Image: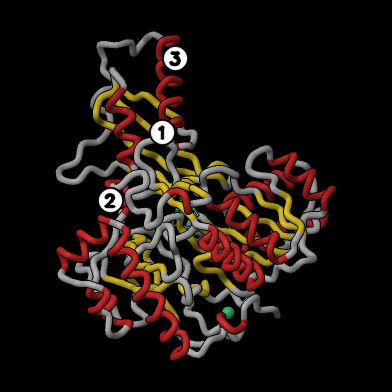
């Protein structure tokens, strides 16, 4: 079993912590010096890099949230001049206020190395043909995996997303051996194989690297059986880097976090207290090497638990459990992050839509579907079919432009959506059952 960077991945904890301490101090200094938002937050909290006497002093520093990034849209959180930025990505959402992230040449090199580590941990080698079915674009998924796979020396097929039958044809003809996509897309591929009357043995796939959305152990078993592969999980988020923050080894017992580049903490999402090792809580990440976009105590909102015992693979890096949901109201639909408020904003701008709506998430086969049910003003047109269809398609287009995702719109009668006292329950998620 190969380890890409054994010196780093199997480091003794005391050596690792010494390295983390050095890089954390530098990161805090640079963040304070170059990013007004951090400067302001540190001053308000009365802390500076000098307060860092021990690694655990990180808890003295303020958190960073998605809101901070939105307020500093687009480049306010960058710690280097744009001249030094060689790549720009963004988290999901094409308009609204998604977060924009940047990378220097060194950042890209580190990113590539970490994805190479993660892919090696999953068993990918130079002999693999890596089929990347994430959408290429502003999303970090495709480009992140792409360069890591090239670094390993694998043959990369940048197929991108969509057109499943063509994907299957290419997998057959080019003999793809490693599949990179969301876990739900892996099952869609399995469904198409069934429909085409093909078995998993018509493909040469042997391993899958899946991420960008939560998935269960049952789903893993289904993917493994139906595609005849080893299915591994990997975790990342664009604010912190993209994919390659953490990934499973072949033992599939939690995702090793690359701690020489990121410090994980687990906090209570209500009190914000740091919780003792082994507790379930919100994952908070601090970057240690990023130049263009350092993140200090970024609240991921992902709920998980960390395991510090040494893994059978020999890596000493801590392992995070599969996440079990989020502490905020962000939804992940086909790997794309969606906030109900983004949808609300679109609906509010459409004349005729009432401020009463409900989001219904479901699965069609294995792909997520999103239906937006919205009440419309009765004075408009409830009985004119053609106008109604035009209206629906106009709202659908606006939603697609904002979310970067297709949602079905269903107009419902005034007063038909249940009213709630207190906090509205706008999301019905049927995907879990
Ligand atoms: P990406 O483009 O990689 O999806 P985003 O920044 O758009 O990155 O989304 C990051 C979020 O996606 C994470 O905070 C988490 O909620 C979710 N996510 C990413 N990978 C996983 C995973 N393996 N398991 C569960 N959730 C994941
Ligand atoms: K995501
Ligand atoms: Zn391991």
**Residue carrying label 1:** 402
- The residue located at (34%, 53%) in the rendering is 77
Disc 1 is placed on an element classified as helix
Which of marks 1 and 2 precedes in the sequence? 2
In this rendering, the label closer to the viewer, 1 or 3: 1
Beta carbon of the mark 2 residue lies under 8 A of ligand 1: no
- The residue located at (25%, 36%) in the rendering is 418
Is residue 314 shown above or below 181? below
**Where's the N terminus, which quadrant?**
bottom right
Q: Are marks 1 and 3 in contact (CB under 8 Å)?
A: no
**Residue carrying label 3:** 390
Instruction: Return the x and y of residue 366 as percentages of the image width and height.
Output: 57, 47
Colouring method of the image: secondary structure
Instruction: Return the x and y of residue 272 as percentages of the image width and height.
Output: 23, 69
Tag shown at residue 67: 2
Query: Quick one: label 2, few (<14), some, or many (20+) residues within 10 Å?
Result: few
Instruction: Return the x and y of residue 341 as percentages of the image width and height.
Output: 30, 40
Which of marks 3 and 2 precedes in the sequence? 2
Disc 2 is placed on an element classified as helix
In the depicted view, which residue is nearer to us: 410 or 312?
312
């Amino acid at each position: 079993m190969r380890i890409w960077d054994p010196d780093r991945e199997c480091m003794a904890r005391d050596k690792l912590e010494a390295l983390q301490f050095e890089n954390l101090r530098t990161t805090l200094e640079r963040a304070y010096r170059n990013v007004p938002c951090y400067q302001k937050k540190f001053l308000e909290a009365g802390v500076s890099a000098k307060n860092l006497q021990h690694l655990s002093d990180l808890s003295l520093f303020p958190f960073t949230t998605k809101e901070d990034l939105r307020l500093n849209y687009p480049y306010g959180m960058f710690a280097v001049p744009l001249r030094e930025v060689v790549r720009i990505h963004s988290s999901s959402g094409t308009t609204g206020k998604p977060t924009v992230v940047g990378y220097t040449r060194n950042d890209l090199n580190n990113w590539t190395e970490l994805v190479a580590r993660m892919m090696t941990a999953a068993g990918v080698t130079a002999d693999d043909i890596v089929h990347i079915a994430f959408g290429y674009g502003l999303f970090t998924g495709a480009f992140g995996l792409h360069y890591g796979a090239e670094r390993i020396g694998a043959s990369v097929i940048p197929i991108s997303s969509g057109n499943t039958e063509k994907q299957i044809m290419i997998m057959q003809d080019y003999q793809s051996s490693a599949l990179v996509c969301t876990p739900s897309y892996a099952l869609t591929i399995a469904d198409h194989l069934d429909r085409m009357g093909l078995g998993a043995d018509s493909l040469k796939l042997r391993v899958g690297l899946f991420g960008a959305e939560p998935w269960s152990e049952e789903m893993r078993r289904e993917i493994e059986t139906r595609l005849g592969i080893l299915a591994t999980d990997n975790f990342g988020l664009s604010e912190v880097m993209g994919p390659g923050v953490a990934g499973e080894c072949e033992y599939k017992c939690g995702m090793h976090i690359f701690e020489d580049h990121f410090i994980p903490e687990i906090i209570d999402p209500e009190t914000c207290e740091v919780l003792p090792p082994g507790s379930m809580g919100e994952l908070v990440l601090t970057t240690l090497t990023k130049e263009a976009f350092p993140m200090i105590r970024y609240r991921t909102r992902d709920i998980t638990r960390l395991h510090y015992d040494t893994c059978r693979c020999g890596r000493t890096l801590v392992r995070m459990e599969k996440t079990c949901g989020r502490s905020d109201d962000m939804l992940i639909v086909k790997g794309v992050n969606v906030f109900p408020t983004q949808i609300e904003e679109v609906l509010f701008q459409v004349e005729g839509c009432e401020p009463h709506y409900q989001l219904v998430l479901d699965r069609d086969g294995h792909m997520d579907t999103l239906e937006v049910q919205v009440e419309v003003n009765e004075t408009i047109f409830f009985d004119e079919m053609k106008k109604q269809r035009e209206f629906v398609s106009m709202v659908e287009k606006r939603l697609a432009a904002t979310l970067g995702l297709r949602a079905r719109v269903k107009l419902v009668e005034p007063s038909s959506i249940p009213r709630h006292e207190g906090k509205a329950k706008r999301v019905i998620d049927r995907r879990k059952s």
